[in-house]
Image (cartoon, rainbow, N blue to C red):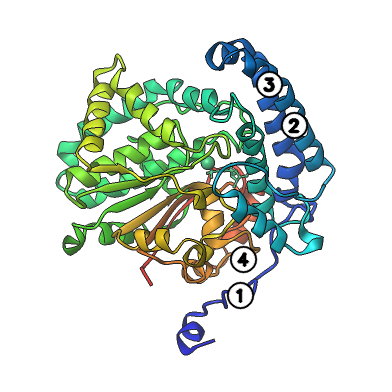
Amino acid sequence: MGDFDKKYNIVDEKTPPHELLSGHYKQSFAYYTLRERLPVILTQVVDNLSRDKDEIAEKFGDGAREELKEIVGNISKLKYELQTDKELTPISGTSSDVMTWNIFLSSLNENSRSFFNACWLHSECYMYRRLRSIFELSTHLRDFDYFQKQKENALTCCTESLEKVAKSIDAHKEMERKCFKDFFRRLLKLNLWGNRCDLSISAGKEIIQTGDPYTDIDILDKYILVDQSADVWECVSQDDTKDHPVTFIHDNSGFEIFTDFLLADFIIEQNLASKVRFHVKAIPWYISDVTPHDFHWTIDYLLGHQSETLRTLGSRWKKYLENGKFELCPVNFFWTSPFEFYKMAENDKKLYTELGESKLVIFKGDLNYRKLIGDYNWDRTESFETCLRGFRPSNVCTLRTIKADLICGLKEGVGEELDKSDPDWMVTGKYGVIQFALKN
Ligand SMILES: O=P(O)(O)OC[C@@]1(O)O[C@H](CO)[C@@H](O)[C@@H]1O
Ligand SMILES: [Mn+2]
């Protein structure tokens, strides 16, 4: 370790800092996820395919109907492999990430190359990648998104709430103009809580956002265990970095992406940055995650909505897309790779450098958090900077509701208190963190 590393207690990048989270530990959320949640998610895909087979055949042709039988068989096979803790076999497929995945899989230790023995992050990502490869290898359904209906429903079922939030933000605008900092921090918190609504935590069961979470947003402050929103404001309001974009690494469709856009809208309107960039997933991922299609669909849905408030927002965001104030980045398979982000610089230098152009990169959600700090049993008071293990291509912010049993940056005693008062506090999404680290 060099002097800098010692001073800041940076962990050597090559040595695993702590025990990896894994399905091997029966008391863990990893075990529960692999055993209970993921098989349910696979069963649900099968059920939805059989429910929608006529619709699918109409859209993709009769050949698709035939192929569905084979696809269902292959999904059942994947479920069997998962439930019987089989080896993570190579991915077959035609996409450019197949080789990277397979090199990664072959680099795993032989005794940690099965669903329950591998690092949880790796086996869970693997399941979603294998699921995708089943469709990718078909002729008629290679581009079919088996989570699409659920994602669309996550937005359409909460339009009342979208409208209320948008109206109440508009109403507060005049008042909030006196203090942009407070306004920004509220939008940031709204954006944080928008992450409560992912579908994979509920194994696909609908979670509906109701009411107007903006007006009462401060009530939830007691659930924010680390709140560095003031630091994020300081970073984003720097005048000399206006020409640098703010970048979102999106997480979920539905209510969450709407709140991402609201925050991005504020950034553009207040001229905090000339451009906001968005990164999405290349393939269907963890049920709710945004793909390019979901991104455009969301804006078009708002644009065509009967509510004038939503139409206004939709048409403004469409315009931002046209004039480059909003930019959807080309899909990048790094986001659906098994790699933690500290490995980005060596695996995708270009992406790392590109993120470095931003004045701020906002990582949304629980899975991005897991990739930021790795699926390790970190000491819960370890600093966020240390856990990033050198991954600070730009100023980094994470907005994450806590849905997996790993965390860092807590004050001494906070975790222990919660263990007593609310034993499930790490896996329900009830609590959240807004954490920030300066560029390297
Ligand atoms: O990343 P998101 O959408 O906030 O959450 C994804 C998630 O539901 O899936 C994983 C477990 O299956 C957890 O990390 C997390 O709970
Ligand atoms: Mn997600």
Of the numbered discs 1 and 4, the one sitting upstream in the chain is: 1
Q: Secondary structure at mark 3?
A: helix
Could you tell me if the residues under marks 3 and 4 are in contact, i.e. CB atoms within 8 Å? no
- Three-letter amino acid code at the position of disc 1: Lys
- Three-letter amino acid code at the position of disc 4: Trp
Furthest residue toward right: 84
- Three-letter amino acid code at the position of disc 3: Leu
Q: Residue at x 46, y 36 (%)?
A: 291
Query: Which residue, given by chain and number where applicable, does mark 4 sit on?
Result: 378
Q: Secondary structure at mark 1?
A: loop
Could you tell me if the residues under marks 2 and 4 are in contact, i.e. CB atoms within 8 Å? no
Q: Secondary structure at mark 4?
A: loop
Residue 161, image quadrant: top left
Question: Separation of disc 1 and disc 3 at Cα?
Answer: 44 Å
Measured as percent of width and height from the top left, residue 406 is found at: 61, 57
| Residue 336 numbered tag | none
Measured as percent of width and height from the top left, residue 153 is found at: 49, 22
Which residue is more in the foreground, 19 or 347? Answer: 347
The crowd level at tag 3 (other Cα within 10 Å; few <14, some 14-19, many 20+) is many
Which circle, 3 or 4, is nearer the viewer?
Answer: 3
Of the numbered discs 1 and 2, the one sitting upstream in the chain is: 1
Query: Which residue, given by chain and number where applicable, does mark 2 sit on?
Result: 74
Query: Which residue, given by chain and number where applicable, does mark 3 sit on?
Result: 68
Measured as percent of width and height from the top left, residue 219 is found at: 40, 42
Which circle, 2 or 4, is nearer the viewer?
Answer: 2
Of the numbered discs 1 and 3, the one sitting upstream in the chain is: 1
- Three-letter amino acid code at the position of disc 2: Asn
Measured as percent of width and height from the top left, residue 6 is found at: 51, 85
Furthest residue toward bottom: 3
Q: Secondary structure at mark 2?
A: helix
